[in-house]
Structure formats: C-alpha cells, structure tokens
Image: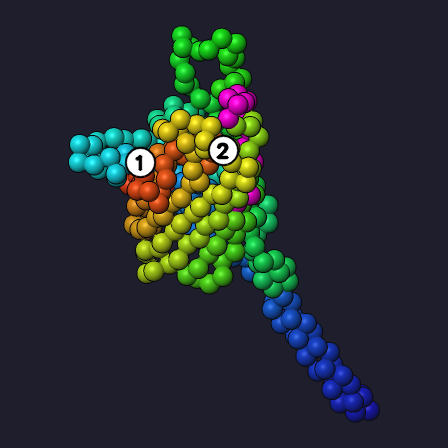
Amino acid sequence: MKKIIALLFLPVVSFAQDNDLLKELEKENKDTGYTIATFKGTRLVNGHSVETKNAGTLEFIFAHRFGRVNDGLYEMYGLDQAYVRLGLDYGITDNLSVSIGRNSADKIMDGYLKYKLLRQSTGEKNFPVTVTVLGGTAYSISPKRDNEPDGFKTVDRLAYTGQFLIARKFTSNLSLQIMPTYIHKNAVDQSKEKNDQLAIGVGGRIKITRSVALTSEYYYRLDAPDNDLFDEGSKRYNSVGFGVDIETGGHVFQLVLTNTSSLTERTFITETKGDFFDGDIHLGFNVTRTFQLKKKK
C-alpha cells in the first residue's frame, strides 16, 4: 500500500522539483549585467569620460600640447612651444575617484571628485546609460602677488566646475557621451563675460582594432559672450578635440588634435582662443600609466 501511495505522489514531487529548477534558471537569467569599459580611460580628449578608477588604483596622467600648427616654420609648426598638465587620479572605491593636477598653460592647480552614480545594465536591473557626477575646483596661480590688480583677493583666483557625464555603450565598438556643464568663476571682466557659464559637450569613441580607437569631443557654450567685446588675440571659441587611442599594456597613449592648449574645464571650455576650423590646431598627446596600490578583491 505504501508503495502504491508513493507511486501516486511521484509525479507531484517531480513536478515540484522541475518547478524549483525553472525558478532558479529564471533567477539566473534575471541577474544584472553591468556594462564595463564604456571608454578605455578617464579622459575623452581634453575633458573627462564617465569612467572612474577602481578602488586602490592610482593613475598618472601626462598631458602635453604643442603650439599652433599655423604658427608656421618659425615656431616649427608649434613644436617649439610646450604646455603640460601633470595629474594623479586615485580610486577611493570602484565608483568614487579623486584627482589633482597642475597645468602649465595657465599656471592652474586643479582638483576633482568623480562619482559613478548610475551604471548601464541589463537583466534584472535594466538601465540604458551610465551617469557620472563630477565636481571640480581650479586655482589660478597667475597673476603673481606683486602684479595683482587693486582689490584682487585670493578667492578671486578660484573657479568651479559641475558636470553630469552621461554615456551609453551601444556596441563593443561604439560609445557616445553628453556632458551638461556649469562653470563659475569668482572673478571675471563683467563687461565681457559672466561669472556663471553653461555649456553642453558631446563626444564619442569608435574602436578600430583591438588596441586602437578614435575619440572626439565638442563643447558648445550656451551663453557665450560676444566676440566683438574681446581684442583680436583674446576672442573665445568652442573647444574641439580629436584623438587616436593606442592601448599598450598598462597604459594608454593618445595622439590629440585640438584648438586649445589648456587642460582644465575652466579654461578649455570658456577661454579657448583658437578657431579649429581656421587652422588654430594644437598637436598633442596624453599618456596614462596605472599602478595597483591595493590588491583586487
């Protein structure tokens, strides 16, 4: 009798086991998959990408810009001039980075905090883009103390940047990013520009081979001052940049063509003095080297 009862309940037990197995499979299929390497580095060309450094990772950044190509043979097409930014980026957590740097072009010290707020993902949590928030401060060492104008204060040397970096990796070969940007300068010539300025940036990356990719970015100033207010050599233009990324082991080498020699948001977004489409092009490069200071979990 017991054997007969067991045989009667066998299909029920089997069905329950199959049902549990299906639930486990459905759960696995719903697991969240996060997009990685939307961009290969923390910089797109002159500006930031959505990427942050992993926890315990230190990145050394050496950015170099030559003079203008259209300066001609006398300046060896810009090669006689050099503008450099030396910087360090450190990953506090996988989603939070801190940066510090020194820019020779404008004698500016800069610092940034970047936090990856949202990540592009599929599966149980489906989100279409990666969103990183950036906050930065720039301190201009120029002018010298002895050359300060009357009434000039230390706080007048400061400027601030706020950005939302929003990117989507469409395929393994194509990523695009937009960068709404707010910049505040404590001191400006009120007859020519405002303390608060807005811009929108767009950029992208196209992978050509396993180790080579093309990058670009463009910043459009939403409330740009009238160029007629500036002297001929001080007119302002929108920042344009193109790059060729070459991955070589533990670092990325990037060749750059851009219309700015500056490498902080305060200057290359709001104070670029070269017209890219009129030949005011700076050849340059970015080199990054990564060091793992803590063991990966």
**Total marks in image:** 2
Q: Which residue is mark 2?
A: 226
Q: Position of residue 234 (x, y in %)?
A: 39, 28
Horizontal relation, residue 232 to residue 32: left or right:
left
Horizontal relation, residue 133 to residue 5: left or right:
left
Residue at 36% in and 36% down: 274
Q: Which mark is residue 65?
A: 1
- Determine the image quadrant of residue 66: top left
Res. 130 in view: yes
Kind of residue sitting beneath label 2 = Asp
The correct choice, above or below, for 50 with respect to 8 in the image is: above
Whole-angstrom CA distance, mark 2 to mark 1, is 27 Å
Question: Mark 2 packing: few (<14 Cα in 10 Å), some, or many (20+)?
Answer: few
Q: Position of residue 211 (x, y in %)?
A: 32, 56
How is the structure coloured here? rainbow
**Which region of the structure is painted magenta?**
179-192
Residue 161 drawn in magenta: no
